[in-house]
Image (cartoon, rainbow, N blue to C red):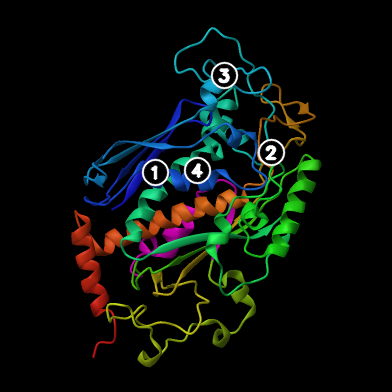
């Protein structure tokens, strides 16, 4: 079982993570995790904080000489914003987010932001300052999930599982469907206002160059209006073996676990798999994925099958009955626009309940959709890695690999 916990506030000292269940002898480095964290920080429409932070996860435990030990892995991501300051007066957060009582006066946040966790949070936890809610509910915590997902991704690479994400919609601009994507293009130096020679495709992580240009324009228009935009991201995981998950209980279904993990990401308001909601408009004969005969299966380099029981289509998104089919797992997430707006919406005051012209605003993003694709990749990796360990077990990576090979050799026709 692979599990993890995160702790930390947006402007506190750090984010801390404990990951448990990773087998021993898996190669893992801070540099590998750092590359995934860097991917999360880029994207057109990000706010000023990404110019301050250089996210890096320090490995505190569970790894020796570049190999996991099988014990819990401890990770630490420092928040540079805690000590570098904020705003033109360069006031650090060290006093306002001090663990110990502080004599330094600070202004509590009482103008509640519609769409954020402020209002239900202050009621549930009996708070007089919305900062006590917004600090933990901030999407800053997703950096911890990306770091944890990097550990899971490193594990999955041992079994030929690859995970890639891209943007299919921002601000009402939809990319044209594509049967194949050059994922390397999405990792090129991103375009931004200070770097007009970068890749606009990479800037919004969209494989359609025409749509990418229009998405950038939509983000610019929202910025000018003091507003924000949402969108849709799609993550594709290839190489996941047939039979991960289970049909026997609702909470063991991989669809349940994937949907819960993706819905747990800030601003995500909907999840679909494969052809998703469009299937409601089709007949069954147009939807269900026909199994190919053996003669059409693709051989692997070792002489086995790339995907035993492979399909002619993949409308199910690689999932049937709560289990993987062996086809690519395709997960799509719909993100609402960010709730913190430069031109805040009207609201009420936490103390008096009276009308306030504008909700509280702190430095924020205009659009997080490109970065969200990386976060969805991370949580999909975590769920798939957990399902792999559930299926194949192993206290060390060699044992897990041996069990995986034996299963794959027996997964074809019974004859």
Element at label 1: helix
**How far apart are labels 2 and 3 at the CA level?**
27 Å
Kindly identify which residue carries mark 4: 142
Element at label 4: helix
Query: How dense is the environment of label 2, judged by Cα within 10 Å: few (below 14), some, or many (20 and up)?
Result: some
C-beta proximity under 8 Å, tags 4 and 2: no
Element at label 2: loop
**How far apart are labels 2 and 1 at the CA level?**
39 Å
- Quadrant location of the C terminus in the rendered image: bottom left
Q: Is residue 252 magenta?
A: yes
Residue at 70% over, 41% down: 194
Residue at 71% over, 22% down: 352
Kindly identify which residue carries mark 2: 114
- Where residue 124 appears, as percent x and y from the top left, is 53, 33
Q: Is residue 133 left or right of residue 89?
A: left
Kindly identify which residue carries mark 3: 92
Q: How many marks?
A: 4
**How far apart are labels 4 and 3 at the CA level?**
22 Å
Q: Report the mark closest to the observer, 2 or 3.
A: 3
Element at label 3: loop
């Amino acid at each position: 079982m692979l599990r993890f916990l995160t702790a930390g506030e947006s402007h506190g000292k750090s984010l801390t993570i404990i990951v448990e269940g990773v087998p021993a002898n898996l190669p893992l480095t801070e540099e590998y995790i750092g590359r995934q964290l860097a991917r999360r920080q880029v994207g057109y429409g990000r706010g000023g904080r990404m110019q301050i932070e250089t996210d890096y996860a320090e490995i505190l435990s569970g790894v020796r000489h570049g190999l996991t030990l099988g014990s819990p892995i401890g990770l630490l991501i420092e928040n540079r914003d805690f000590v570098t300051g904020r705003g033109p007066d360069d006031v650090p957060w060290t006093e306002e987010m001090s663990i110990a009582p502080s004599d330094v006066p600070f202004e509590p946040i009482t103008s509640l932001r519609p769409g954020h966790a402020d209002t239900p949070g202050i009621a549930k936890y009996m708070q007089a300052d919305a900062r006590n809610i917004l600090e933990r509910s901030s999407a800053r915590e997703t950096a911890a999930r990306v770091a944890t997902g990097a550990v899971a991704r490193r594990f999955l690479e041992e079994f030929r599982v690859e995970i890639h994400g891209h943007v299919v919609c921002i601000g009402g601009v939809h990319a044209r469907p594509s049967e194949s994507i050059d994922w390397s293009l999405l990792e090129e130096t991103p375009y931004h206002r200070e770097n007009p020679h970068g890749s606009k495709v990479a800037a919004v992580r969209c494989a359609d160059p025409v749509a990418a240009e229009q998405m950038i324009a939509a983000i610019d228009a929202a910025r000018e209006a003091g507003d924000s935009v949402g969108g849709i991201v799609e993550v594709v995981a290839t190489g996941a073996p047939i039979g991960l998950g289970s049909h026997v209980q609702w909470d063991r279904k991989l669809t349940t676990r994937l949907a819960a993990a993706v819905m747990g990401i800030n601003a995500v308001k909907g999840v679909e798999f494969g052809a998703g909601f469009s299937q409601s408009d089709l007949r069954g004969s147009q939807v269900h994925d026909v199994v190919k005969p053996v003669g059409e299966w693709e051989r692997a380099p070792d002489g086995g099958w790339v995907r035993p029981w492979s399909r002619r289509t993949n409308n199910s998104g690689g999932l049937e009955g709560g289990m993987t089919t062996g086809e690519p797992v395709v997960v799509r997430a719909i993100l609402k626009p960010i709730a913190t707006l430069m031109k805040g919406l009207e609201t009420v005051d936490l103390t008096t309940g009276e009308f306030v012209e504008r909700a509280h605003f702190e430095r924020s993003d205009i659009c997080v959709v490109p970065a969200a694709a990386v976060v969805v990749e991370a949580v999909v990796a975590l769920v798939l890695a957990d399902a792999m360990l559930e299926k194949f077990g192993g206290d060390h990576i060699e044992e897990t690999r041996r069990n995986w090979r034996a299963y794959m050799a027996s997964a074809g026709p019974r004859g």
